[in-house]
Image (cartoon, rainbow, N blue to C red):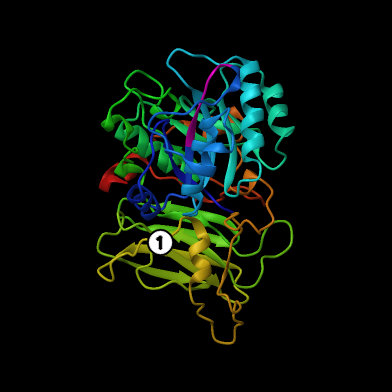
Amino acid sequence: MVVLHGITVPAGVTPTAGDIDTWVGFGFTGVRLAVPMASGGRFPATSGGPVLDGAGAATTPADPGLDQAAALTRMFTDRGLRVTLRIVPSSAGYVPSVAGLAAGLERLATRFRDVPGLLGYEVSDGGGGGAGLVAAVAAHDGAHLLWRERPAPFDAASTVAVNDPTGYLVGWKDGSAVSVRGLVASADAFGLSWFYDVPSPTGGTVGTAAPVGLGGAERRAPAPPADIVRPYPVAIAGVPEVLRFDASRVLTVAYRTAPSAGPPLAAGTATAISVPAWSYPTGYQVQVTGARVTSAPGAGLLCLVSDPGAARVEVRVSPATGPAVTPPSVAGSAGCRATPAIVPAGGRSPGPDGPRVAASGDDATEEYSGPLLWLLPLVGAALAALLLGALLRPWRRRSGPGPGWSAVERPTMADTSAGGD
């Protein structure tokens, strides 16, 4: 099971290598990239986007904006970040028709269907035409899905992008620190992926707005608020049971090693946990039962391989004075493949290439079944409201076999406020 944490890149913004280093160091694993579309489903070049020349500029001459989006996507996926493409209007006041969106999605899907590292395509749900838009994507790209924005079933002031029955969080209420802390804590406790988007002073979000006019300050990459930077399991080699991050910055993760359905995981499959230096400025210590740590001390990506015969693994990460946290060089769980394996006494080596990692699509050669690998189900409105709607009170949910969290302890708002979590 894999959960994404990511950021939205607005139209007309070209992040620097330093920006991406920061995101990877924060533990982000995805990018939601705005792609401006004009009438007729065309994609014009965007001021502030990558400047293309040579072969890159000639790929789709009628839609230079697609070439800019491809260049940005490659920039992100080269660092292990997964990318979803969000269509936005090319100018303020322009509202795409259903026919225009369908035409644009056909061009987008044709251009990006074979691009590794892509999650899918996203549009606003305001225009309707859902079945036709889904068909427009499916006719040209059978590997990726269309995600449509709508109010979150657990909080109408928040927004999710869904492809029933799965989805991820994209709208952050009023963007206040209290709202952001509460939503991040709730999403993490529920195992829901999210992409942060900066609220716009005119309403909506910056990432879904039309490109802004000239002005260097307006084109800077978004600065993530401290409230969304927190440790979390990027990939779990098993069925998650407990996720808790408290006001003392102690992260507790527990999971069963045997999958609830399907074939067993390969021996040596690693669990990957993001441990950002922001959360542990003086270092961290790890207590684990049922598994061995295979990453180096102070690694920003904590890697664990379960002990032979262990049915359950529990990990506790807490602040300590020790080696400074070293940020990973690439996003996601791929960093666990390069770590030397520590073999338990009497156990088997995971192999000459180090431990495997829980499947996350980090490799273009891995079997891929679309974004369902990353995104957990959004339950029905009534149940979701019960689980997530009341951000001010803790909850505990127990479930039967399946990919969701069970026995999850959700932080209260007081917990998430203390210490800036």
Residue 398, how many percent across, how many down?
58, 47
Residue 329, compared with residue 163, is above or below; it is below
Residue at point 45% right, 12% down? Answer: 93
Q: Is residue 192 visible?
A: no
Image quarter of the N terminus:
bottom right
> Considering depth in this image, is 9 or 6 the residue closer to the camera?
9
Instruction: Look at mark 1 in the image and give the residue it sits on.
Output: 328
Residue 364, compared with residue 169, is above or below; it is below
Q: Picture quarter containing residue 15?
A: top left
Q: Picture quarter containing residue 175?
A: top left
Residue 252, compared with residue 99, is above or below; it is below
Residue 406, compared with residue 70, is above or below; it is below
Q: Is residue 22 visible?
A: yes
Q: Picture quarter containing residue 133?
A: top right
Instruction: Give the residue at the far top of this rendering.
Output: 93
Q: Which residues are magenta?
A: 33-39
Instruction: Give the residue at the far bottom of this rendering.
Output: 346
Residue 124, how many percent across, how many down?
55, 23
Q: In the image, what residue type sits under mark 1?
A: Pro
Left or right placement of residue 278 versus residue 71 in this view? left
Residue 296, how many percent across, how many down?
40, 73
Q: Residues within 10 Å of mark 1 (few under 14, many from 20)?
A: many
Residue at point 59% right, 87% down? Answer: 346
> Considering depth in this image, is 343 or 88 the residue closer to the camera?
88
Left or right placement of residue 184 versus residue 62 in this view? left
What kind of element bears circle 1?
A: loop
> Considering depth in this image, is 245 or 301 the residue closer to the camera?
301
Q: How many marks?
A: 1
> Considering depth in this image, is 81 or 385 the residue closer to the camera?
81
User: For the stretch drawn in magenta, what is the main secondary structure?
Assistant: strand
Whether residue 247 appears in magenta in the rendering, the answer is no
Residue 336, how many percent across, how many down?
50, 66
